Image (spheres, rainbow, N blue to C red):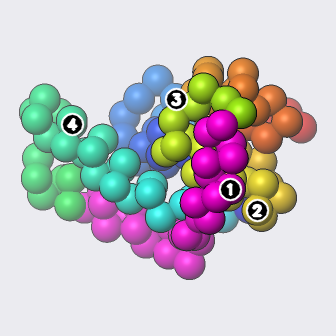
Amino acid sequence: MIIADTNIISYLLLPTPYSESADTLYSYDSQWAAPLLWKSEFRNVLAIYLRKGIITLEKALQLLEAAESMMVGNEYDISSSQVLALVAKSSCSSYDCEFVALAHHLDLRLVTQDKKLLREFPKTAVTISRFMSS
């Protein structure tokens, strides 16, 4: 099991430069976990794609259903104190720190392409390619 940030989930379901890597990651380990926040963030990604005319409302709803099905049973509520402790010692947003807190709580790696997360939490956060090579 891995902690996947919302971008990784998005890369798997939407066409991006990282989609092929996300597909490979999912083939390697299909048990992805995330804080409950992932769903709101993913809805926001879909909103951007909708507003840009890249996908239709029907497609957005299909993608949301696919993502929710993929994540069912692997969504977690995170302790606010854990999140704020991570915020206090980093320059990352509280949203990003939710993913780090979950990784710490479950003793798992956070797979992300987010440069700030990778820089600020190098013992927890790894890129797709680094995770696949380890």
Q: Nearer the viewer, residue 100 or 127?
A: 100
Mark 2 vs 3, N-terminal side? 3
In this view of the protein, can residue 95 be seen by the observer? Answer: yes
Where's residue 120, x and y in %? Answer: 72, 26
Helix, strand or loop for disc 4 = helix
Amino acid, disc 1 = Gln
Q: Which residue is mark 1?
A: 82
Query: Image point 83% across, 58% down: which residue?
Result: 107
Mark 3: secondary structure: loop
**Which residue has dot 4 on it?**
49
Determine crowd level at label 4: few under 14, some 14-19, many 20+ residues with C-alpha closer than 10 A.
some
In the figure, is residue 127 to the left or right of 39? right
Q: Earlier in the sequence, mark 1 or mark 4?
A: 4
Q: Amino acid at mark 3?
A: Tyr
Label 2: which residue?
105
Q: Is residue 67 magenta?
A: yes
Q: Amino acid at mark 2?
A: His
Cα distance between the residues tagged 1 and 4: 32 Å
- Residue depicted at x 56% and y 78%: 73
Vertical comparison of 57 with 115: above or below: below
Numbered disc 1: secondary structure: helix
- Location of residue 133 by image quarter: top right
Q: Earlier in the sequence, mark 4 or mark 2?
A: 4
For label 3, the residue is 18
Q: Return the disc, 3 or 4, that comes first in the chain's sequence.
A: 3
Q: Please, what secondary structure does the residue beneath circle 2 have?
A: helix
